[in-house]
Image (cartoon, rainbow, N blue to C red):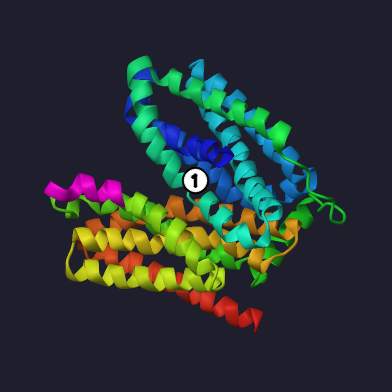
Amino acid sequence: GAGLGAAAQYGKISVIFDMLPQLYPAVGPALGFMVSLVGFVGILLGVVAGLVVARIRYRRALLWALWTGAAISLLQALQPPLWLMLASRVAEGASHLAVVVAAPTLIAQISAPRHRGFTLTLWGTFFGVAFAVLALAGRPLAQSYGVPALFLAHALYLAAFALLLSARLRRLPQEGPPPSLSPGKILRQHLEIYRSPRLVAPAAGWLFYTFSFVSVLTVLPPYVDAAHRTLVMGAMPLAGIAVSMTLGVALLKRMTAVRVIELGFALSALCMAWLWLWPGHPAAAIALAASMGLVQGASFAAVPQLNDKAQAQARANGAMAQMGNLGNTMGTPIMAAAVAGVGFAGLPLLAGGAFLAGLGAHVLLGRLRGP
């Protein structure tokens, strides 16, 4: 539930982006920063967030992030001037990071080991579910009562989960001294994380997954037959969620999360070859989303499988947040430029290459970890 609120910190602007000129007329392209600033914060501070959350502790960080997010959304509902709205989006990026680092770390620690595949796969659906809810309920709310009503609803949602978790969520036991936040230590932590085949593995695959996911959903629609386009584009995210929660969870009981990720990347690359041969084929598009669903859920499940301590999991989740934001930020403009330059072939070439790179990264890091 907290994750849905964090995903809405992205999605609430995306689903009403065309309505923002009503609040800020004559601003023009600067409104694009309303979406991207949250991602830029994640790119810059993803690993730092992992260190901060481990230092101030996971329950406290999650509650702080929810209350801060609620206050920010309440401020946005008051229609502040543009400079203050943009500043609030930077602060919202910090709140978002704290949630996406603290929540999966808490889930992994609180869940029984036999349930982690299910609970972390469920966590992995938070972006897709939140965007679907916002499209179905959030945008109509903004259309009926104005954009500030959506921001107010988001504030109330975050506050409700902060209250719920304050009463229900237990603290994790302390595990050694908290990490230092000195500049030198932060730099060393970056180097340590990205040199460790255990800490970096989930983030490495996540970079290539996020690079492809949003960009494919953005670039593919014009190539799908108009008669099937709405159905296919609506079914793709749902197919990914359904497969991750069914086949993905079943596979996680029989093989490691990394093997499920590798299978997902391999099937996704095959689906891109299918789309290259039959551009815009509805079955190929849905099969692609289903294959990517295996990567989605298993990537979060890989964090505690590869790292058993909460501090290590927080660092790995911080790296995932950093690489995920980098992939989301780069993917669409690069994919759009490729398609504009060489036509539809740019999509399967780039996305297929990204899937193969994700597969290769996991295979290489697996060899570095040893048997």
Q: Residue at x 48, y 36 (%)?
A: 8
Say above or below: 154 vs 243. above
Horizontal relation, residue 335 to residue 371: left or right: left
Q: Nearer the viewer, residue 113 or 212?
A: 113
Q: Position of residue 58 (x, y in %)?
A: 73, 45
Q: Position of residue 332 (x, y in %)?
A: 36, 52
Report the number of discs: 1
Q: Residue at x 40, y 21 (%)?
A: 147
- Which portion, as a residue range, is magenta? 226-235
> Could you say whether the residue bearing mark 1 is in a helix, strand or loop?
helix
Q: Nearer the viewer, residue 188 or 245?
A: 245
Horizontal relation, residue 229 to residue 295: left or right: left
Q: Residue at x 87, y 56 (%)?
A: 176
Q: Examine the rendering and report whether any part of residue 40 can be seen.
A: yes
Q: Position of residue 162 (x, y in %)?
A: 65, 30
Q: Residue tagged by mark 1? A: 126
Horizontal relation, residue 247 to residue 306: left or right: left
Which amino acid type is marked by label 1? Phe
Residue 198: quadrant of the picture? bottom right
Quarter of the image that includes the N terminus: top right
Say above or below: 182 vs 64. below
Disc 1 crowd rating (10 Å Cα; few below 14, some 14-19, many 20+) is many
